[in-house]
Image (cartoon, helix red, strand yellow):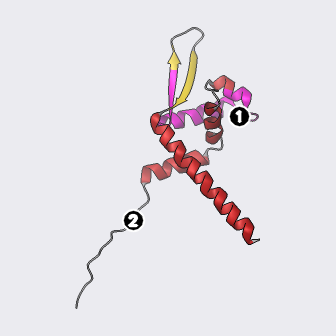
Amino acid sequence: MKTKENLFSKKSAPNKSARMVEAIYGCKWSLTVYQLLANGINRPGAMVSHVEGLTTKVLNVCLKRNVEFGILEKITFNELPPRVEYKVTDFGQKFLRILDELEKLQQEIDTDFSSLN
């Protein structure tokens, strides 16, 4: 009996990047934080004061996760009182472009779906 040679191996989702996207979209504040940073608001206290409903505790968890992923960089200044700022890393810029593309895809899906109704 002849057997076919397998031409393709099983394709799997990229583990780390897929988890990263899931974690970022799972955090309801990450996208808001990116928007704040894009508008020059990079200090945690200013972030909390600019967004209704955002608490310091939740923001700190969100920022910590983004730093762990390498999307954001925490900059600590050796000053009194202490000052901390966040900025998007080079890797973070690439990651945010992917999120932008996902948003465009969702807009296309929404447009296509609404045209069917």
Identify which residue is drawn at 51% across, 11% down. Answer: 78
Q: Which labelled disc corresponds to residue 54?
A: 1
Q: Amino acid at mark 1?
A: Leu
Distance CA(mark 1)–CA(mark 2) = 39 Å
- On the rendered structure, is 66 left or right of 14? right
Identify which residue is drawn at 61% across, 53% down. Answer: 104
Q: Quadrant of the C terminus?
A: bottom right
Identify which residue is drawn at 70% across, 62% down. Answer: 111
Badge 2 marks a residue whose secondary structure is loop
1 or 2: tag closer to the N-terminus? 2
Q: Is residue 10 above or below residue 3?
A: above
Q: Quadrant of the N terminus?
A: bottom left
Q: Which labelled disc corresponds to residue 115?
A: none
Asked if labels 2 and 1 touch by Cβ distance under 8 angstroms, the answer is no
Q: Which labelled disc corresponds to residue 11?
A: 2
Q: Is residue 29 above or below residue 8?
A: above
Q: Amino acid at mark 2?
A: Lys
